[in-house]
Image (spheres, rainbow, N blue to C red):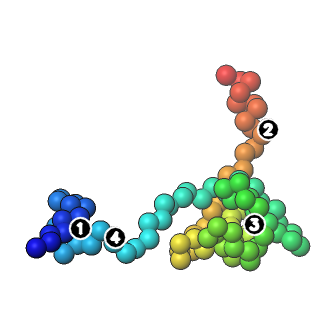
Amino acid sequence: MALSVSGYAKRDPTRPPGMSSFQSGEVIAERKLKLQGLVTGVSPWVVINDMVIKQGENKKGIKVITIKPEKVLVLYHQKKQWLKWQSIDIKNSAKKSFNK
């Protein structure tokens, strides 16, 4: 009588009965989108997470739908979201630094 224990020995003893060793599904690490630059005009484009993306383009799952002077509408993980441009007023920032 031959007894095969190799399959049983490889089984994880902590796994509940009926659970396979591989589960279906995809794990996606959620990245935070950061708007780093914005150009409007005839050929608008933006810089998001160190990538230059033109309006209508899709790069690494980020689709740029609309580019406005102060914000960008993107589609990311099947969700639309606005990314706002955080402009810095250099004159006021410099004044505050010197008046301290």
Q: Secondary structure at mark 3?
A: strand
**Percent position (x, y) of residue 82?**
61, 67
Q: Nearer the viewer, mark 1 or mark 2?
A: 1
Using the image, determine if residue 31 lies above or below residue 41. above
Residue type pointed to by label 4:
Phe
Can residue 84 be seen here?
yes
Image disc number at residue 22: 4
Sequence order check, earlier mark of 3 and 4: 4
Image disc number at residue 53: 3
Q: Nearer the viewer, mark 4 or mark 1?
A: 1
Sequence order check, earlier mark of 1 and 2: 1
**Percent position (x, y) of residue 58?**
69, 73
Residue drawn at x 75%, y 44% as measured from the top left: 89
Q: Residues within 10 Å of mark 4 (few under 14, many from 20)?
A: few
Residue drawn at x 67%, y 22% as measured from the top left: 100
Q: Secondary structure at mark 1?
A: helix
What separation in Å lies between label 3 and label 4 (alpha carbons)?
A: 37 Å
Image disc number at residue 91: 2
Residue assigned mark 1: 7
What separation in Å lies between label 2 and label 3 (alpha carbons)?
A: 30 Å
What separation in Å lies between label 4 and label 1 (alpha carbons)?
A: 15 Å
Q: Quadrant of residue 81?
A: bottom right
Can residue 11 be seen here?
no
